[in-house]
Image: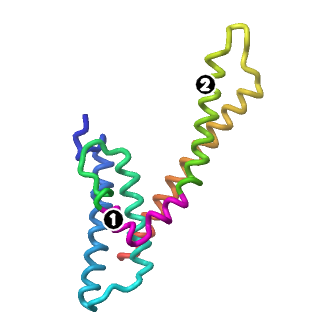
Amino acid sequence: MSVYSGFSTRALENEYNQCLLQLITILVKRCSLALSINQLQDDTKFAGNFGKLYGHIQKLEEYKYAPPKYSIVLKELSEQIGIIQIKQSLVPQQHYRKFTLQNANLQQINNLLNVTPSKRQTKTSYLKSNRLKTEESAYNRAIEKSLRYRELEFLCQFD
């Protein structure tokens, strides 16, 4: 049962709320700028910041159980800015690696289930399975490090 606004932990809820606050802040700044000069300009910095926050919100909402999910509301704006097209071109590359690792792990599990007591796992297959696990964990750590770096980079822009 989720207690923290649809998230399983308070830390995820806090991270989500901070991300929403930052998104609202840049939207307010952008709208006030547009109203002050009576026009909307092509602003790549705004699009970049919005894209980062929108992607982070979508990622966090994968772990959210209960509504509201703000990425649904922001989808139209992101399509107008062009964020969705950029993200879709990057998603298959990221998911392709994860998909192949998951298939490899699934195949190893199936192989282990089909092993009779008379068969033993060879040293080579054992080393291969450990190498795949190590590669997958290294890949996940790199993704997390990249996300943290982007968040810090974004926060430094407002200082």
- State the SS at label 2: helix
Numbered label attached to residue 84: none
Quadrant where the image shows the C terminus: bottom left
Predominant SS along the magenta part: helix
- Disc 2 marks a residue whose amino acid type is Ile
**Magenta stretch bounds:** 74-90
- Disc 1 marks a residue whose amino acid type is Glu
Which residue shows up at 31% across the image and 56% down it?
Answer: 72
Quadrant where the image shows the N terminus: top left
Left or right for 22, reference 111: left
**Residue 130 falls inside the magenta stretch:** no
Numbered label attached to residue 76: 1
The crowding category of the residue bearing disc 2, from other C-alpha atoms within 10 Å (few below 14, some 14 to 19, many at least 20), is few
Q: Which residue is mark 2?
A: 109
Q: Is residue 39 above or below residue 55?
A: below
Q: Is residue 48 above or below residue 96?
A: below
**Residue 79 falls inside the magenta stretch:** yes
Farthest residue to the bottom: give it: 37
